[in-house]
Image (tube, grey):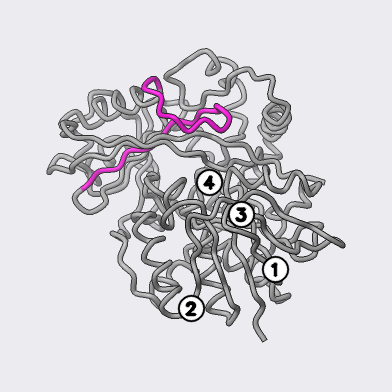
Amino acid sequence: MGKDILILGAGVSGVLAAYMLGRAGHRVRVVDRQEAAAMECSFANGGQLSYSHAEPWANPAVFPKVFKWMFDDDAPLVMRFSTDPQMIRWGLQFLWNCRGSAAHRNSRALMKLGLHSKQVMQEIVAETGIEFHHGHKGILHVFSSQKCFDDAQEQVRFQAELGCEEQVLSAAECVAKEPALAQSTKKLFGGVFAPIDEMGDVHLFTQNLAQYCTETFGVEFLYHHEIMALNAENNRITHVVTNQGNLAADAFVLALGAYSPLLSKPLGIHLPIYPMKGYSITFNANDNMPALSVTDDALKIVYTRLGDKMRCAGTAEFAGYNTSLSQKRINPILRGIRTLFPQADLSETSEWACLRPSTPDGPPIVGKTSIENLFLNTGHGTLGWTQGAATADLLCSVMQEEHPRIDLTGLTLDRYA
């Protein structure tokens, strides 16, 4: 007999969890403060399903750059000095995870999750048939320094040991694979092509999947519900307090991204998640834009064609829960576009910022908590679109007390104990 499950958050992670749990026969409701699904972090991301991406932000190559980037508005990652205790604690954990041994351990966790997510996503797409500008052409990472290209080749060799095959390309081979790169005004030293990677519109996917869940499994979406608190008694959540009244259920899933720690903290559950603000620009695609999804490694900017639009996303900024657009962070993306693809048509652009729920080590947090009926599906950072299918599948297994399809080591909350 199915349980009554309340999922907190209608982003891609929450809706994928609703799909898995609804499909398994549970009564599922999803509560969100917005007017529809995928209106916050899942609204306008980079569009990459980068299953091969297993190198966490916290790695040895980043460590010496962090302090330099503190004073550089154009840096890919801006981590300002802060008196916020949560930020200080997170930052120290991040630096600790920059060690080579930690980065390799976290890469292994990300790789197994990425490979599993590709498999689960294939199953979801085959079953639902939903449209989301899904592309299967792979992702090409290009490098504008020999040192970064050399480091990338080391990562390719490491990931090959984990079952992910990628192709190392010369600069000329990069242009041959994606002719739009011929217009680049900066020198390219080479690239890495990941044929297993894909692309797609996360907003379109999430909204269409939400509709599918309602029509097929009877999932109910409760929009315009501001979540105020979780009420706990005898080590169980009894109800969620919202601006529209209390909502009770048998089990609860916390899938509120960067806002998850704000609700778990009063319960005595510390989630090492901090908001990493990311930006994106969307503009009309023309014949000079790449057909492949491309990542400019130096600037950490991604370029993805979604239908007749181009989506460029990048930069990471730690600014607390400030969601406002900063032109200082938009400008590096615009300069990056004009450098790599100078023939882009930027006459009409729309800009977006979101708060990515980032863990200090990289992998998300999925599974049980110390409270019996509270479960987690959060902390995906920049990879929620990529990893969401896998974590939803794993969450469903945990909640049904079934053996998960992959090992949960490195993905659960107890790794921080």
Residue that numbered label 4 is attached to: 157
In primary-sequence order, the first of circles 4 and 3 is: 4
Q: Earlier in the sequence, mark 2 or mark 1?
A: 2
Q: Position of residue 416 (x, y in %)?
A: 77, 45
Q: Secondary structure at mark 4?
A: helix
- Check if mark 2's residue and mark 1's residue have beta carbons within 8 Å: no
Q: Which mark is residue 242?
A: 3
Q: Quick check: 184 above or below 273?
A: above
Distance of label 3 from label 2 (alpha carbons): 22 Å
Q: Name the secondary structure under disc 2.
A: loop
Instruction: Give the foreground label among 3 and 2.
Output: 3
Which residue of the protein is positioned furthest toward the bottom in this rendering?
A: 1
For disc 2, the marked residue is: 218
In percent of width and height, residue 56 lies at 58, 40
Q: Tags 1 and 3 in contact by the CB under 8 Å rule?
A: no
Region in magenta? 309-328
- Tag 1: residue type? Ala
Q: Earlier in the sequence, mark 3 or mark 2?
A: 2
For label 1, the SS is strand
